[in-house]
Amino acid sequence: MQFGAIIIGDEIMSGKRQDKHMATVISTLRERGLELAWCQYLADEPALITSTLRRTLAEPDVVFSFGGIGATPDDHTRQCAADAAGVALQLHPDAEAEIRARFGGEITPQRLKMGEFPIGSRIIPNPYNRIPGFSLGHHHFLPGFPQMAWPMMAWVLDNLYREQHAAGSTGEDAIIVRGAGESMLIDLMNRCLEKFPGLKVFSLPHMSDNDRYVELGVRGDAARIAAAMVELKDGVTALGFRWAKTVEEGR
C-alpha cells in the first residue's frame, strides 16, 4: 500500500506561504514505519482538482489531501471530490452533530455547509475545533491549517491503517564514496537491487568548490538494510574506491 499527498492552495503556488505539510507527512509516516510515495501541489482550480482526484480515486493509494474544505468561495475541494466520485454533496449527520456542538446557538447555514461531504463519506474528528474532515474511500481530506490537519492525519493512520505500520518498519543507511562518479557505481547498484528485491538503492552526488563525493545507500525494509549495506561496502572496496560512514571520516 502506497501513501500519497495532495496539497492545495493558491497561497502555496504563489509563494505567499511556504508549505509545511510535506515534511510533516514524511515524518508522521516514518514514525509508523511507512513512506510517502508521491506528493502533488495544486492551485485552487476546480477543474484541476477534480481531474486529479478522479485519477487518484481510481487508484489503490492512500491519499491525504490538505486544504480547501472550508466554506469560503475559494474552497473547492469538497465539491471537487464529489464531482470526481460522481456523487452529490450532502450534510453528513455526524459532521452536523459536531458543528452544532461546536457553535451551539451561534450555528448558521454557512457553518453547517462545512459539514457537506460527498455521499458515502466518513468524518475525521478534529480535536482543535470539532469541524471535521472527511474520508472517501482511501482518500482523507483535511484542513489546510497545520494545527488541525496534522493530528487528524495521525488519527487516520492510527485508527484506519494500524495493521500497515504495525507489520514492520522502514529504514535507511548510506556511506560516503570518494573518487567515484555515479556512472562507476551503476553496476554495483543494479547487483544490489537484484540481490535485495524490494529495497531501493540510491546515489546522491555532492559537489562543491572544495569537496566532491557520492552518498550511496539503501532504503526500505529495516530488517534487510544491514545486509544490503555490506553488499555496497564490499562492492565499493572491490572497485578500488574509499568509503566512510560520514563526510568527516572520509576526508
Image (cartoon, helix red, strand yellow):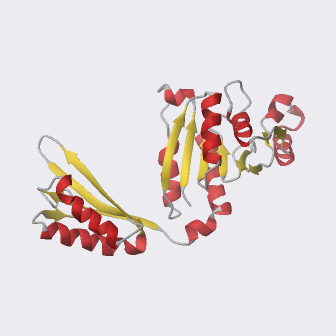
The residue lying toward the viewer, choosing from 18 and 65, is: 65
Residue 227: x %, y % from top left: 32, 75
Position of residue 162 relative to residue 180, above or below, is below
Residue at the far right in the pictured view: 105
Position of residue 192 relative to residue 114, above or below, is below
In this picture, residue 86 sits left or right of residue 12: right
Residue at 74 percent across and 45 percent down: it is: 132
Residue 150 can be seen in this image: no
For residue 167, which quarter of the picture?
Answer: bottom right
Tally the numbered discs. 0
Q: Quadrant of the C terminus?
A: bottom left
Residue 26: x %, y % from top left: 48, 52
In this picture, residue 135 sits left or right of residue 223: right
The residue lying toward the viewer, choosing from 98 and 166, is: 166
For residue 218, which quarter of the picture?
Answer: bottom left
Residue 123: x %, y % from top left: 76, 49
Residue 190: x %, y % from top left: 28, 64
Residue 57 can be seen in this image: yes
In this picture, residue 104 sits left or right of residue 25: right
Residue at 50 percent across and 64 percent down: it is: 33
The residue lying toward the viewer, choosing from 107 and 4, is: 4
Q: Quadrant of the N terminus?
A: bottom right
In this picture, residue 223 sits left or right of residue 13: left
For residue 131, which quarter of the picture?
Answer: top right
